[in-house]
Image (cartoon, rainbow, N blue to C red):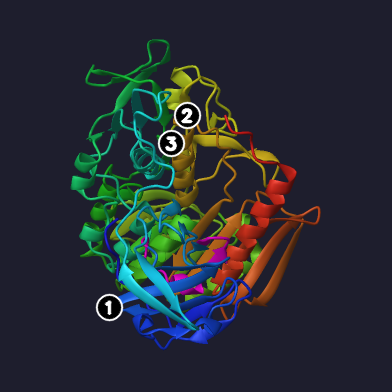
Amino acid sequence: MGALPPISADRYSMSEGGTVADDTRPDLSGGFPIQELTAHRVVAGRVGDDDVIVVRHADALLAVAGRCTHYGGPLATGLVVGDTIRCPLHHACFSLRTGEALRAPALDALARWRVEQVGDTVYVREQCPATGSTHATSSNERTDHPGSVVIVGAGAAGVAAADMLRREGFRGSLTMLSAESDRPCDRPNLSKDYLAGNASDEWMPLRPAAFYAEHAIDLHLDSRVSSLELSERRVRLESGRCIPFDALLLATGADAVRLDVHGAAPSQIHTLRSYADGRAIIAKAGAARRAVVVGASFIGLEVAASLRERGIEVHVVGREKLPMERVLGAELGLSILALHQAHGVVFHLGTTLAQMDDTVAVLSDGSRIAADLVVMGVGVQPAIALAKQAGLLVDRGVVVDEYLQTSAHGVFAAGDIARWPDPHTGERIRVEHWVIAERQGQTVALNILGRRQRFDAVPFFWSQHYDVTINYVGHAESWETLEIDGSLDARDCTVTYKRGGRVLAVATISRDLQSLAAERAMELNASVQHPPAASG
C-alpha cells in the first residue's frame, strides 16, 4: 500500500491492562533493564531512525517495527494477544515472531530485529532478514492446490485474496478481473483524507503496478464479466473471451444507489464508489462554493466533512430524523449532528432531493438550495446479478457457508455480496465494511488451498469526521439496550449495544484500546459457542 503520512504518538508503552508510559524514544540498541518487560508489556523506542517495540512472550523477547504497515498506527498503544499485536487504529494484527501481517487491513509484514539479553539488560541488535509466510509451502509439498484461480472483482476482498494466495505458496494461474479502469485503490480513503485534500494520488493504490507483475497476478482492468459458466468451469467476458478456473472467487462488491432526480443532467449528480468518482468530485470541488450532499449516514457525512475542510459550504439532505441513528442510535446521532453543525454544515433532515432546476437543488419540502456540486451517498446495493444468472443461492446477497463457499463447489464469495453465518450474533448477515471484505478474501484464499478455515472475524469499521474517529466492532441490526460510558460531548466514550443481555456491538470514540478489547471479548465468546472446525 502507498505510504501515508506517519501518525504521531505521544505514548509508547502499553500492556493488555492499559498501563501507559511517556514516550522518551530511548535508543533500544543501547540496552534497557529487563525489569521494564513484564508479561505482555511493550517497551518502545528506536533503533537508528526506526520505531521499534519489544514484547516479552513466554520466554521469548521479540522486537518488531513500531508502526503498523497500514496507516502507520503506533503499535505500542495497541493490544498484545499471545504472540501477536493488534493496531489501535484499524485493528490489523501481526505476528510478533515473524512480523507477518496476519489480518487485514495491513497486508505488509513488519520488520524484525534480533534481541539479546546480557545479564539484566536487553539489547536490540541488527535487523533480521525478511521471511515469508509461516504457512507458505512449496509446490512440491502440496498436490491438492487448484491449477487456476479466477477472482471476479478487484476491491478489498479480491486484492486480499490474491495477496494471501501468493503469500501462502500458491503457484498456479491467478487472474483478477476488474470492471474499473484504475488499479485497486484504498476505497475508505476516498471519502476521507483523499477527498479532503490530505492524501495525494500516489498514496491511493493498494499495491503498485509492479506488485502484480512480481507476484504473477494477471490483473485485467476494464474487463467486465458477462456470465459465469459454472458447468464448464469458466468465466466469460463481455469481449467474448473465456477464462477457465479450478476455483472462483466472486468479489463483485456493491453499486452505489442512485435516486431518480427529475431535471438532473447525467453528469450533474456524483456518487462516490470508485477512484474515478473521487477524482471527478475533486475536480468539481475546485471551483465549487456550495455543495449539497444527499444522505446523512457514514459516506454522506464523511463527504460533508471532507468538503468543509476544503472550505466549501455544505448542505446535507437526508430522510433521517438524525444522522446515523439507525446504526449508532439517537444519542450518538445527536452528537454527530452537533459536531458537523459546529463545523458549519447545514442540515435538511426529513426530506430528500426531488429535482434539479439548473444548478438549484429543489427538496421534497419545497426548499431550494443553490448547488455547484451535488454528491449522493444514500447507500449501495450488492452486485449479485452474475451470481443470480449463474444459479447460485441468493438471499439479499450471495449465500455462503462458514467457509465462504457458495452453493456451488469451488465457488466462493466475499465482501459486500456475501451473506454468511455469523457466530457472534447467531444470524446470517451481510455487511459492507472494507476490513471485513479483506479478511473474508484472506479466508477464501486459505480455503481455496484446502485449509477449511471457518470465517469468524468480528465485523469492524471506522468512520472519520474532522478530528473525530468512530470505531465500531460487532454487528447490531437492532438492540434492546444502549449503554454509554464516558462523555459524548467530550468525544471520549464507549457505546455498547445489547440484546438479551448479550453485547452485539461496541462503538468507541478516543478509546482505541477499549475497541480492541471489545473485539477480543467477542472473539472469545464466539469461540466458546462455536468450537474451531476440525482441520480438513
Q: For marks 1 and 2, give the one nearer the viewer.
A: 1
Viewer-proximal residue among 379 and 532: 532
Q: Where is residue 176 in the image (x, y as percent from the top left)?
A: 30, 33
Residue located farthest toward the right when viewing the structure as drawn: 500
Viewer-proximal residue among 336 and 45: 45
Q: Which quadrant of the structure image shows residue 349?
A: bottom right
Q: Which quadrant of the structure image shows residue 64?
A: bottom left
Q: What residue type is disc 3 on?
A: Ala
Q: Residue 288 carries which label?
A: none
Q: For marks 3 and 2, give the one nearer the viewer.
A: 3
- For marks 1 and 3, give the CA distance: 36 Å
Counting residues from the start of the chain, the first of labels 3 and 2 encountered is 2
Position of the C terminus by quadrant: top right
| Residue under label 1 | 49
Image point (47%, 65%), residue name: 87
Q: Residue 412 carries which label?
A: 2
- For marks 3 and 2, give the CA distance: 10 Å
Image point (23%, 16%), residue name: 240
| Residue under label 3 | 445
Residue 360 visible, this angle:
no
Query: Is residue 480 left or right of 87 when viewed as pictured?
Result: right
Residue 395 visible, this angle:
yes
- For marks 1 and 2, give the CA distance: 44 Å
